Amino acid sequence: MSLRVLAAMSGGVDSAVAAARAAEAGHDVTGVHLALSKNPQSYRTGARGCCTVEDSRDARRAADVIGIPFYVWDMAEEFDRDVVQDFVSEYAAGRTPNPCLRCNEKIKFEAVLDRAVALGFDAVCTGHHVRLADGRLRRSVDAAKDQSYVLGVLTREQIAHTVFPLGHSTKEEVRAEAERRGLAVADKPDSHDICFIADGDTAGFLNERLGSEPGPIKDESGEVLGTHNGAHTYTVGQRKGLNLGGAPERRYVLSIEPVANTVTVGPRESLQVDEIIGRRPVWSGCDPVTEPIACTVQLRAHGEVYTCRAWQRDDELVVRLEQPATGVAAGQAAVLYEGDTVLGSATITSTSRSAEAAAAF
């Protein structure tokens, strides 16, 4: 069945090939590039970029080669509000957000999809490495490039209006196809890091917006071991950059208290948690689960997968791990899977460690 498809074209090789495949499949495809910054020069460029002026030009050239109409949509206001400001406020609250996940949720699959449907499009096409089967998200065949985790926040309704043409291909196959199609982005490096932090200095970016008020670094007993220049520049599980001098053992960030401006550190075993609570549960692969089910959970992008039992309790997601995990930070997503199929997700709000897990050390 031929669809009227809006292809989101970032200027990279994945979205270009996805748009080309959608057009070749017989769909009526229109390309669109999202202008996300009021000052594009402040964003990363070249191999480390995403959604810059340079990327816009690459996307336009790809659309010309494919032979599809192309437009640029100004989404700078929405991006600043829903991604950049959210990023800053989450760190200010002692949490560790994933801005790419939030961009997918709020921009590419909410604001863009809403506008696309209003304009009469049937679906949005993207270059994400994920499969779609029977209305459910599944991991890409290329495990190293799988992006099902950062799409785990999508709702069933959003998934019903999406096309993911790349999930059955490896990145190498996508690049080879781009070369055959004459797409100039065939060898363009993937984007990395956070697009709106031009120099990659996340701590400096946050200090500029939140200040750099010094505060104590304490151990679990409350003893002051050192000082920091802003609790918001740390994340749970962090080891480097603590500057604790001659500490006899390695210490890791265990918690961040923004009100007291305090960072608590301790040994690695103190990072162990086996219960995770999340807010805003989204069930895209099944009906809401109110009794514990056996499944697996991924707690960070490209992170380890844990066997667990999970269920929704009131408006929270409860996840109990079979084996403890370390470095689980509030603000990240917990994405549930049945095999390689996404069941649902929630944003992590708190973690804890059972007496049984503590006794194992």
Image (tube, rainbow, N blue to C red):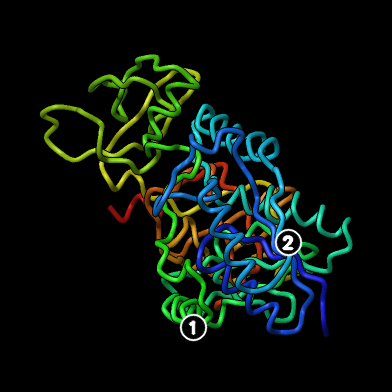
Tell me the kind of residue under disc 1. Answer: Arg
Single out the mark in the foreground, 2 or 1. 1
Numbered disc 2: secondary structure = loop
Looking at the image, residue 253 sits to the left or right of residue 280; the answer is: left
Quadrant where the N terminus sits is: bottom right
Of labels 2 and 1, earlier in sequence is 1
Q: Is residue 289 visible?
A: no
Q: Nearer the viewer, residue 300 or 75?
A: 75
- Residue on which disc 1 sits: 180
Q: Secondary structure at mark 1?
A: helix
- Can residue 80 be spotted in the picture? yes
Q: Position of residue 105 (x, y in %)?
A: 67, 52
Q: Is residue 44 left or right of residue 103?
A: left
Q: Residue at x 77, y 78 (%)?
A: 27
Between residue 325 and residue 118, name the one nearer to us. Answer: 118
Per the image, the residue denoted by label 2 is: 290
Q: Residue furthest top?
A: 213
Q: CA distance from mark 2 to mark 1?
A: 50 Å
In-image side of 28 versus 68 (left or right) = right
Where is residue 253 drawn, in percent x and y? 33, 36
At a point 63% along the width and 67% down the height, the residue shown is 64
Task: Give the amino acid type for the residue marked by disc 2 in the picture.
Answer: Thr
